[in-house]
Image (tube, coloured by chain):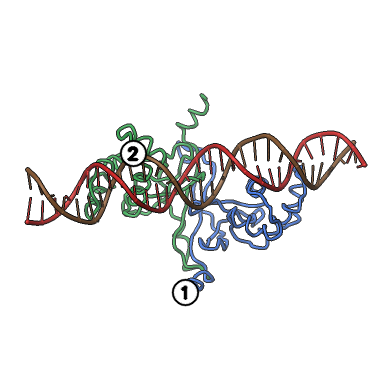
Chain colours: A blue, B green, C brown, D red
Amino acid sequence: MDIKQALNLLKQNGYKYTGKREMMVQLFFEEGRYLTAKEVLDLMQKDYPGLSFDTVYRNLALFEQLGIVEGTEWNGERRYRIHCGGDSHHHHIICTECGRTRAIELCPMKAIFGQPENFEITGHKFEIYGICVECKEYEKNA
Amino acid sequence: MDIKQALNLLKQNGYKYTGKREMMVQLFFEEGRYLTAKEVLDLMQKDYPGLSFDTVYRNLALFEQLGIVEGTEWNGERRYRIHCGGDSHHHHIICTECGRTRAIELCPMKAIFGQPENFEITGHKFEIYGICVECKEYEKNA
DNA sequence: TGGTCAAATCGTAATATTTACGATTTACAA
DNA sequence: TTGTAAATCGTAAATATTACGATTTGACCA
C-alpha cells in the first residue's frame, strides 16, 4: 500500500480528495507504525490547527474499511497502521510503547484444520507484544 | 481454577473475604465466558442493588493480577473470563456476540524460534473470533 | 466477645476515548 | 461558474474507565 494506491482507492470508491486525507495517508505511510487517533490528531495539527476529532475518526474508519489502514487495539485504545503486505497475509510483533512493528510471516490459522464445531469463524488475531530496542534504550536513560 | 482455589488465592495474598468477591468469582465460574465490567455489574446487581463501579473494576483488576481471571479486549471493551486451563497454556475461539469460548491447544509461539532482533518480547495474543451457534440461531429469529 | 484498624465499598466526580450532529465549507461535475 | 452532495468544523453526547473522600465491614487480637 503506497500513497498513490491509497488515494486511488478513495477516488475509485467515489470519495473526495482532500488535503487532510492526503496528509493522513502520507502520515501513516511515513510513520509505518501503529498510531492512535490522538496521535494522528496531534501530528496533523501542525499543519491543520483546527482539525476536528470527527474528521480523524471518520477517516480512520473509512481508511480501515477501504483497506488503506489496518486496525487493532491494546491498552484500551484503538490503533491503526498503513495496511502492509498487499496480498500476503501476515501478522506482527508490536512494540506496545511506540507502535513500531515487525512482520511475522507465520499465520497460525494454517495449522487449524477445518471449521471448529459450534462456531462460524469471522476473524482472528495473532500479535506478539514487546518493547523495541529504541524504547528500551529510552527507558534506560529515563 | 475453581471457586475454592480462587477464594484461597485471595486469602493467601492477604485480601479479605467478602460476599461480593465470592459472588463475583462464582459468577465467572458459572458463566464460563468473557464478561465486560458492565455485564458483571448488571448480573450482580440482582443480589447487590447498590453495587459500585469501583468495586467491580477494582476486583476485576485484582482477580486478573492474582490469576483468577484472564482478560482481553475487543470492540473497545475490556473483558474477563475465569482463568481456565490451570498450568496448560492455550488460546481461545471466542464468540464476539456473547463471549462464549472454546479452547485451542495450539500455541503459535511454539513455532517462533529464538528471540526476534530488536524486540524484547513481553506477551502475545492468539484469538479466533466467530459467532457461536446459539448466537447465530438467535440472529436468525430476530 | 468486643474493640481496633486497615481494607473494602459506596457514591459520585473526573478523565479519556469514541460517536453524534447541526451548521458551514469545499470538492467535483455539469 | 454554479449546484449539490460530501467533508469538515465546533461542540455536545455517549461510553468506558479511573479516582477519591466518606463510610462500612472483615479479620485479628486482647
The reply to whether residue A43 is visible in this rendering is yes
Q: On screen, B115 above or below A123?
A: below
The reply to whether residue B84 is visible in this rendering is no
Q: Which residue is mark 1?
A: A140
- Mark 1 vs mark 2, CA separation in Å: 43 Å
* Crowd tier of the residue under label 2, counting other residues whose Cα lies within 10 Å: few below 14, some 14–19, many 20 or above: some
Residue B85 on image: x %, y %: 33, 49
Relative horizontal placement of residue A90, taking residue A55 as reference (left or right): left
Q: Residue furthest bottom?
A: A141
Q: Amino acid at mark 1?
A: Lys
Q: In this orientation, which residue lies closer to the viewer: B84 or D3?
A: D3
Q: Which residue is mark 2?
A: B51
Residue B75 on image: x %, y %: 51, 44
**Mark 2 chain:** B
Q: Residue furthest top?
A: B141
Q: Which residue occupies 23% across, 49% down? A: B16
Q: Which residue occupies 66% across, 53% down? A: A87
**Mark 1 chain:** A
Q: Which residue occupies 48% across, 60% down? A: A129
In this rendering, which labeled residue sits more in front, label 1 or label 2? 2
Q: Within the image, what quadrant is residue B37 found in?
A: top left
- Contact (CB < 8 A) between labels 1 and 2? no
Q: In this orientation, which residue lies closer to the viewer: C14 or B84?
A: C14
Q: In this orientation, which residue lies closer to the viewer: B37 or A89?
A: B37
Helix, strand or loop under label 2: loop
Relative horizontal placement of residue B22, taking residue D11 as reference (left or right): left
Helix, strand or loop under label 1: helix
Q: Amino acid at mark 2?
A: Leu
* Crowd tier of the residue under label 1, counting other residues whose Cα lies within 10 Å: few below 14, some 14–19, many 20 or above: few
Task: Specify whether disc 1 shares its chain with disc 2.
Answer: no
Residue A88 on image: x %, y %: 63, 55
